[in-house]
Image (spheres, rainbow, N blue to C red):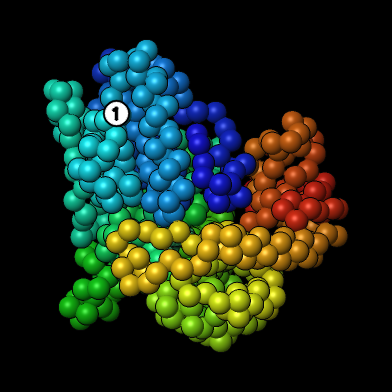
Amino acid sequence: MIRNEELEKVIDESQQGSPLTLESDEKNSRKLYIESYGCQMNFSDSEIVASILAKEGFNTTQDLAEADLVLVNTCSIREKAEQTVRKRLEKFNAVKKTNPGMKVGVLGCMAERLKNKFLEEEKIVDMVVGPDAYKDLPNLIQEIDEGRNAVNVILSKDETYGDVAPVRLNSNGVTAFVSITRGCDNMCTFCVVPFTRGRERSRDPQSILEEVNDLWERGFKEITLLGQNVDSYLWYGGGLKKDFEKASEMQMATSVNFAKLLEMVAIAQPKMRIRFSTSNPQDMTLDVIESMSKHENICNYIHLPVQSGSDRILKAMNRLHTREEYFELIDNIRKIIPDCAISQDMITGFPTETEEDHQDTLSLMEYVKYDFGFMFAYSERPGTLAERKLEDDIPEATKKRRLTEIIALQQKHSLYRTQQHVGKVEEVLIEGSSKKSDTHWMGRNSQNTVVVFPKENYQVGEFVNVKINECTSATLIGEAQGLSKNN
Ligand code: SAH
Ligand code: F3S
């Protein structure tokens, strides 16, 4: 499966494992090839799509040449992500010459952004399906089977897939994603997500718990609760987050926020590791940090994108917090969870960004010393407020130079952070073989740092205490000291 580079660090090794084979019955005669790009939510959505299509008689395949249906779950976040998808469509076109019956569908954010235009721009495409319309796939496939193009890009007001049990694709059998919110209301001025994924809505906590319990029963040991902005999770019986003020007193009194959801999940499965992503600084509250500190099984790691260290740029980005408020949040995290890892997303070259603004980003990074980060040059996205109101005025060379500088600084901080683990004994959950050595396991500690160590007799899915002996800026290297009490 192809991945987009910024995800490599997050899901790289964890995506290893044998391809999933679906149980076939006499109906299961067609082959689905599905490829995902972009955020973890897309990878998670592809599992929902595979589940919906399994009921329609589709088995997944990893061989493009034998596919009856090719689906590509797309990303619009930066122009490069869209170009990558268009290149893949060219490849599918070439394959179609030897496999003329093959149909091609585009899913996800590019589908939502381009709608019918996709059919005109890319002749290979038979079907365009937005992120909230996957339940309509059986009907849409019938349409294309009958020789018509099919499009559904209607966005929903409700959490759309709470009742679909995802099929785990390329699973390592140990870690899984569980989506808890869809859409985003934050309207950061650079970001296309609110347009492609619609308004924010939360999933019923009961259905989240059912999915988590089911994963535990099937041997999974770690879950990541997913949302564009998890701290904004709010369940009051369904409906859009922005309509909460219209809810009844009863609904308000029994509502569940993110801190509460975290506790519910942590208590329901006390031996399961719990992670979550992504947190937005303006929505993260102290009670979330308190919940993390109270429950041993909630991992000590927060992905806390800031995008810029300059107050002026934060404002222009419509990030609703200041640099000082961000520092306060960081201080609180460090006070309540001293060994909490923190990672960032940054953008260089947002319109009007001066050298002084850039220096503010570097000094913010010095203050936090992130464990790792995902850094990007600004890419203007059609339809966003920044595109409509601001000129993309920073030369590409300047964006790139600033990007190189923040990546170099992050590298230094990453090494500083990994060095703090050397000499310690840490609990690691084994996810699979190390990519570089068959004789070593790869797993992660609570802080989400990759740890490799000799296999001995340990098994995938076991929690092992590992003594850390050495490190690079991205990996800890150690040796097992025995099973942890958590098994
Ligand atoms: N809240 C989301 C953010 C999605 S976008 C989440 O779940 O992670 C991921 C990252 O892409 C953002 O944090 C931002 O750093 C980057 N990004 C978004 N739009 C961008 C753009 N127009 N140009 C460059 N980077 C962008
Ligand atoms: Fe995008 Fe900002 Fe939401 S980055 S996904 S609009 S929090």
Is residue 195 shown to the viewer in this render? yes
Give the answer, above or below, for where 444 lies relative to 232.
above
Give the answer, above or below, for where 127 lies relative to 369.
above
How far from the left and from the top, in percent, is residue 133?
A: 23, 45
Give the answer, above or below, for where 471 lies relative to 34.
below
Compare residues 304 and 88 and report the one nearer the observer. 88
How far from the left and from the top, in percent, is residue 265?
A: 45, 60
Give the answer, above or below, for where 312 lies relative to 135.
below
Compare residues 432 and 107 and report the one nearer the observer. 107
Q: Residue drawn at (82%, 46%), measured in percent from left and top?
A: 479
Compare residues 45 and 208 and report the one nearer the observer. 45
What type is the residue that disc 1 sits on?
A: Ile
How far from the left and from the top, in percent, is residue 421?
A: 78, 61
Q: Residue drawn at (29%, 28%), measured in percent from left and top?
A: 124
Q: Is mark 1 within 8 Å of ligand 1?
A: no
Task: Give residue 295's quadrant in the image.
Answer: bottom right
Label 1 crowd (10 A; few <14 / some 14-19 / many >=20):
some
The residue singled out by tag 1 in the image is 124
Q: Residue drawn at (23%, 64%), measured in percent from left and top?
A: 238
Determine whether the residue tagged by mark 1 lies in a helix, strand or loop: loop
How far from the left and from the top, in percent, is residue 95?
A: 39, 19
Answer with left or right where residue 217 lies relative to residue 367.
left
Is residue 282 shown to the viewer in this render? no
Compare residues 275 and 87 and report the one nearer the observer. 87
The number of numbered discs placed on residues in the rendered structure image is 1
Q: Residue drawn at (26%, 30%), measured in percent from left and top?
A: 123
Q: Residue furthest top?
A: 98
Answer with left or right where residue 321 lies relative to residue 67.
right
